[in-house]
Image: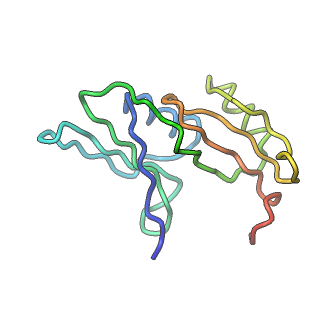
Amino acid sequence: MRMLHTMLRVGNLDRSIKFYTEILNMRVLRREDYPDGRFTLAFVGYGSELSNTVLELTHNWDTDRYDLGNAFGHIAIEVDDAYAACDAVRNAGGKVTREAGPMKHGTTVIAFIEDPDGYKIEFIQKGTQGIDQ
């Protein structure tokens, strides 16, 4: 077994694709409209779905906004330099919600940003999180 994807419902698919491709440097892997169901699925990620976990962006055509609730936490992305990643997001017009730095009570260097729909994305600096590299 392996993780395939995480699905996020988005209010504006083009805006979300622009964020994930232009700010986080993912690429669109596939996109398909389902007119009978009035929705579109777009899969974005850093590599092929055959060997990587990706994001499924779901756009329901008749919904432009979602209440995110309080159960979902965040998506985590490993970065070489969390400080530089925050600067790049900010310079591209993105929103940094927690500046890069060591996590409370630990040494892992983290930061948080938000996508256009308000989903939290954690940057974890490579080599600081204590997992096998």
User: Furthest residue to the left?
Assistant: 36
List x then y, in percent, for residue 88. Answer: 70, 33
| Image height of 60 relative to 50, above or below | above
Q: Residue at x 18, y 43 (%)?
A: 34
Q: Where is residue 59 in the image (x, y as percent from the top left)?
A: 32, 36
Tell me the quarter of the picture where residue 131 sits: bottom right
* Quarter placement of the N terminus: bottom left
Q: Position of residue 44 (x, y in %)?
A: 44, 48
Above or below 125: residue 127: below
Where, by quadrant of the figure, is residue 58 drawn? top left
Q: How is the image coloured?
A: rainbow
Q: Outermost residue, bottom direction?
A: 1
Q: In which quarter of the image is the C terminus?
A: bottom right
Left or right, 34 with reference to 97: left
Residue 54 vs residue 84, the one in the foreground: 54
Residue 36 is left or right of residue 89, and the answer is left
Q: In this view, does 72 lie to the left or right of 57?
A: right
- Which residue is pictured at 75% across the width and 31% down the height? 87
Count of labels in the image = 0
Residue drawn at point x = 54 percent, y = 33 percent: 115
Q: Position of residue 38 (x, y in %)?
A: 18, 36
**Residue shown at 47%/55% (left/top)?**
54
Q: Is residue 52 left or right of residue 12?
A: right
Q: Please state which of residues 78 and 118 is positioned toward the viewer in this rendering.
A: 118
